[in-house]
Amino acid sequence: MSRRRWCGALLAYGVMATLEPIHADDNGSVRYPAGAASFQSNCVVCHGRDGAGTPSLAPPLTNYPARYIGVPEGRRQLAMTVVYGMFGDITVEQKHYNFKMPDFSKLSDDALAAVLNFVVFDLGHASADATPLSAAEIAAERSQPALADAVRQHRTALLLALGLAN
Ligand code: HEC
């Protein structure tokens, strides 16, 4: 599906687009099917079916989230991004993105853990040895309210710690 089509989909945010089947690995198997279904209904409009993102607006999810899963502050980052949203300029692999990531606090802890595990393991191909996010980790972020701008500041510190920014 072309990038132009995704920009159109973004403008029509809220209107259900007709989508092709969700990403599967080489064997055609998806490790987190419930997360895949949720990604299709909640995330694809901005991040694209394969998580490749929308230029200048929504970042790709195919690399950094799989790096975040290996460290405690990265796991917190993933949870807080979906619980509180994020806005303002961010850099992913030397490219800038600046748009509003909505919060998805209306989804359950289980649903948010599943959609993030789909992003990390199915789209991002994180090592199978990495520990999946749990509903308890989502609940822990919910219990300490943060503003979307604080989520972005936490991300800046995380990227420095991971050697992904300078
Ligand atoms: C309306 C568009 C939109 C939707 C829908 C959306 N996102 Fe986002 N997402 C963004 C934007 C924009 C950013 C970057 C925010 C910024 O620029 O500060 C982002 C950032 C992220 C990040 C952080 C990436 C990084 O490098 O740190 C993750 C993870 C993420 N989104 C996951 C999701 C998931 C999972 C869903 C569905 C439940 C979703 N997004 C739905 C627009 C969206």
Image (tube, rainbow, N blue to C red):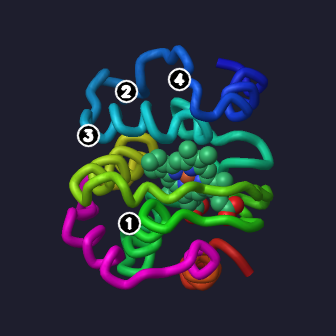
Q: Residue at x 53, y 23 (%)?
A: 16
| Three-letter amino acid code at the position of disc 3 | Tyr
Closer to the N terminus: mark 4 or mark 3?
Answer: 4
Q: Residues within 10 Å of mark 1 (few under 14, many from 20)?
A: many
Quadrant in the picture for residue 41: top left
Closer to the N terminus: mark 2 or mark 4?
Answer: 4
Mark sitting on residue 16: 4
Tell us which disc is closer to us: 4 or 3: 4
In whole angstroms, how far apart are the C-alphas of marks 1 and 4?
30 Å
Q: Which residue is mark 3?
A: 32
Q: Could you tell me which secondary element the residue under label 3 belongs to? A: loop
Quadrant in the picture for residue 85: bottom right
Q: Could you tell me which secondary element the residue under label 1 belongs to? A: loop
Q: Residue at x 75, y 31 (%)?
A: 7
In whole angstroms, how far apart are the C-alphas of marks 4 and 3?
22 Å
Q: Which residue is mark 2?
A: 24
Relative image position of residue 31 (x, y in whole percent) = 25, 38
Tell us which disc is closer to us: 1 or 4: 4
In whole angstroms, how far apart are the C-alphas of marks 2 and 4?
21 Å
Mark sitting on residue 69: 1
Asked if disc 1 is less than 8 Å from ligand 1, the answer is no
Q: Is 138 one of the magenta-colored residues?
A: yes
Q: Which residues are magenta?
A: 128-151
Relative image position of residue 4 (x, y in whole percent) = 78, 24
In whole angstroms, how far apart are the C-alphas of marks 2 and 1?
20 Å
In whole angstroms, how far apart are the C-alphas of marks 2 and 3?
10 Å
Instruction: Answer left or right for 27 relative to 163.
Output: left
Tell us which disc is closer to us: 3 or 1: 3
Q: Could you tell me which secondary element the residue under label 2 belongs to? A: loop
Closer to the N terminus: mark 1 or mark 4?
Answer: 4
Tell us which disc is closer to us: 2 or 3: 3
